[in-house]
Image: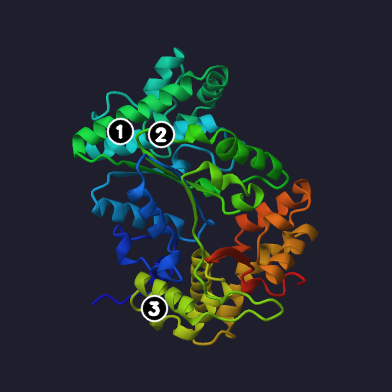
Amino acid sequence: MTTLTAKDFHNAFIDTNRPTDVMSYYVNRAPDTAHDSVAEMKQAIEWEETPGCYLFSGLRGAGKTTELQRLQAELAQEGIPTFYCNADDFLDLNEPQVTQTELIFTALAGLSHAVNERYGKDFLTETIWERTKRIMTSEVGIKPKVKAPMIEVELSLKENPSFKQELIQFANSSNAFFHDAATFASEVATSVKDKTGQQKIVLIVDSLERLSAPNGQENTLFESLKDLFFNFPARLAFPDITVIYTVPPYIHAVLPSINQFYSGCFSLPNFKVMQTPVKDQDLKRNPEGIAKMVEVVAKRFNDWENFITKPVIEEFAWLCGGNVRRMFALIRHTTKKAVLGKVNFPIDRVNCMPVQQAILEETKNYQWLNAQDRKWLAHCKTHSGNLAQNINELSTDLAPIIRLFDHSLVLNYQNGSIWYQVPPIMTGHFDA
């Protein structure tokens, strides 16, 4: 029998180490059946009479991709062909200025790739790249693909900036690109329907919540988000394919009327490890939410209690505010510090050296918090409610809101209305 090591335990909590079968490690975070955002989205898709266009928001590291994999698996059980596009394979998500043209091209590039992967490389007569290149009647070189050779020419938006600029200029000068994109989507849908006999098709465009801006370029990112999701939302819908786009969680705060343009807008909350805040009272722990996060750990690694005991994991769940990525980071930091410090497993005290060093490691970089950041942290800790109604000047309030969400220093929850709170690990890092 193989003895599992601290290295095995540590590596089980690396974000990218997910088993193929999503349901083997899935834990439903919904506080009750009425507030299960994935179940709500699935119901909306199944009940829609015409293909819809949906937004799904969630923090980076909150478990959004896992939830989308659950949705994909459940739709597959109903016989609905569902295709997944990781926008990061096609776009530079660290570029604060992304156009709607690039997003539509990316969605259809991901669709082309996923359909050909499932049904054979010659299933489609042409990809969106080939189609667009033909209608542009231009010659654009294709650079070799180093990062992901299994994805063909569609990676050219990231790898070939000259084509990207030509595409944007072409779309700005004519509606031909948008018209032909819709036609291409319809043709793909027809081919899939003929192949499967199903009349409903779903495309998931993931990772767009990772759109970010270098410090000082938050207003550029905001204008880009407006262009992507607010100015011409009808372009993002396809006549014969239901499409889901992920978006940053702060989009509802800075563009509060965005919901009206879409078939539905859904938000992925963090695990509800704290009870709904009551004004002028300290935050109280929610044992049910904490227990769910312990279950997340147990599903990732069966013998977890040989390395960190349940009370310590429960404290990690509380400190991270129900954010999966941060809890995994605390587990990894603690494991490494224990091995380096020659501390015996299991780690059974929160005040022991490895845990305290792990907490320090996870919070040491927050010295960049400026006065505006700290003001908004204090606001979210004290008030927890609607952010939009407390924005006085978007030009000054936008940057800290984006930064705090990008770094998961403000977390979103939902049981009824959406509310916000600061993870308890941040206590002592700002005045509230």
Indicate the quadrant containing the C terminus: top left, top right, bottom left or bottom right: bottom right
* Nearest to N terminus: mark 3 or mark 2: 2
Q: Which residue is mark 2?
A: 238
* Nearest to N terminus: mark 1 or mark 3: 1
Mark pair 3, 2: CA separation: 46 Å
Q: Position of residue 269 (x, y in %)?
A: 51, 63
Front-most of residues 182 and 408: 182
Residue drawn at point x = 51 percent, y = 31 percent: 102
Q: Which mark is residue 304?
A: 3
Which residue is most to the top? 137
Q: Position of residue 43 (x, y in %)?
A: 36, 54
Q: Which residue is mark 1?
A: 189
Residue drawn at point x = 77 percent, y = 63 percent: 375
* Nearest to N terminus: mark 2 or mark 1: 1
Judge depth for marks 3 and 2 and give the one in front: 2
Q: Is residue 40 above or below residue 333?
A: above
Front-most of residues 8 and 272: 272
Mark pair 1, 3: CA separation: 45 Å
